[in-house]
Amino acid sequence: MDTHSCRKSGRKENNPDGAGPVPEQQPELTGITWQKETGGTGYRFFLADETATENFGRLLGTLAADGDVYCLSGDLGAGKTLMSKGVCRSLGVEEEDVVSPTFSLMNIYNGTVMEVRHFDLYRLDSPEELADIGFYEYVGGEGVSLIEWGDLFVSELPPEYLQVNLSIVPDGRVVELIPLGLRYNAISKEVLRHVNAGA
Ligand SMILES: Nc1ncnc2c1ncn2[C@@H]1O[C@H](COP(=O)(O)OP(=O)(O)OP(=O)(O)O)[C@@H](O)[C@H]1O
Ligand SMILES: [Mg+2]
């Protein structure tokens, strides 16, 4: 595996005034609805359109802290990269910098609020390849880790993370949050609170 496959964004500081992190405004939550009737964990939401998917990511980004790990799973085209873009945006990454890491395997973004490490494990075959791309050093370190297709390597994931499952439904997407650990349970509850407050 080529260790140069990691792509880094060139920007170090996005705030033109150099005044430090730009506080993220709460995203518009139109088109995001809690699917109360489905039971289960209670953290299941319908996303009516692309904007809702990206804004859900932005909400997850506003709730993120250093060291947090979000694993995004779901079929091809379910919306993992689009939701990751939302997370990146709320952490101060220039929108045009964010690209799918399907081929680069990992992208690092120097967001003005926090660094983001964005992985896509779809094309990897073994834990040795994960080591080659620096997965074990980077995940859970400073900044936020986003892992697309993390479910392909469940045994290699940290003990606690937020599992974000996306599924394609006829008229949009459904996202389910499965928190592993108290920290992620708190984030999931906050998401629910924001969505219901915005309804
Ligand atoms: N809520 C939604 N309703 C309808 N279409 C959506 C919604 N959210 C995302 N999409 C569409 O789904 C697609 C998601 O693409 P994206 O690259 O984010 O998927 P992905 O899960 O990362 O796929 P891959 O596994 O190939 O990396 C885009 O075409 C986007 O327009
Ligand atoms: Mg993707």
Image: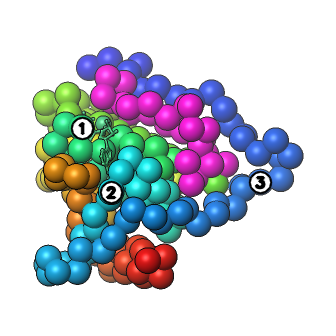
Callout 1 crowding tier (Cα within 10 Å): few <14, some 14–19, many ≥20: few
Q: Earlier in the sequence, mark 1 or mark 3?
A: 3
- Tell me where residue 194 appears, x and y as whole percent: 46, 77
Measured along the vertical axis of the image, is residue 20 above or below residue 31?
Answer: above
Measured along the vertical axis of the image, is residue 37 above or below residue 106?
Answer: below
101 within the magenta span: yes
Q: Which residues are magenta?
A: 89-112
- The mark found on residue 77 in the picture is 1
- Disc 1 Cβ-to-ligand 1 distance below 8 Å: yes
Q: Earlier in the sequence, mark 3 or mark 2?
A: 3
Residue type at mark 1 is: Gly
- Disc 2 Cβ-to-ligand 1 distance below 8 Å: yes
Q: CA distance from mark 1 to mark 3?
A: 35 Å
Left or right of 139? Residue 155 is left
What residue lies at 32% left-to-right and 78% top-to-bottom? 185
Callout 3 crowding tier (Cα within 10 Å): few <14, some 14–19, many ≥20: few
Residue 140 visible in this rendered orientation of the protein: no
Quarter occupied by residue 34? bottom left
Q: In the image as oriented, which residue stretches furthest toward the front? A: 171
Pick whichever, 186 or 128, lies toward us.
186
- The mark found on residue 20 in the picture is 3
Q: Secondary structure at mark 3?
A: loop
44 within the magenta span: no
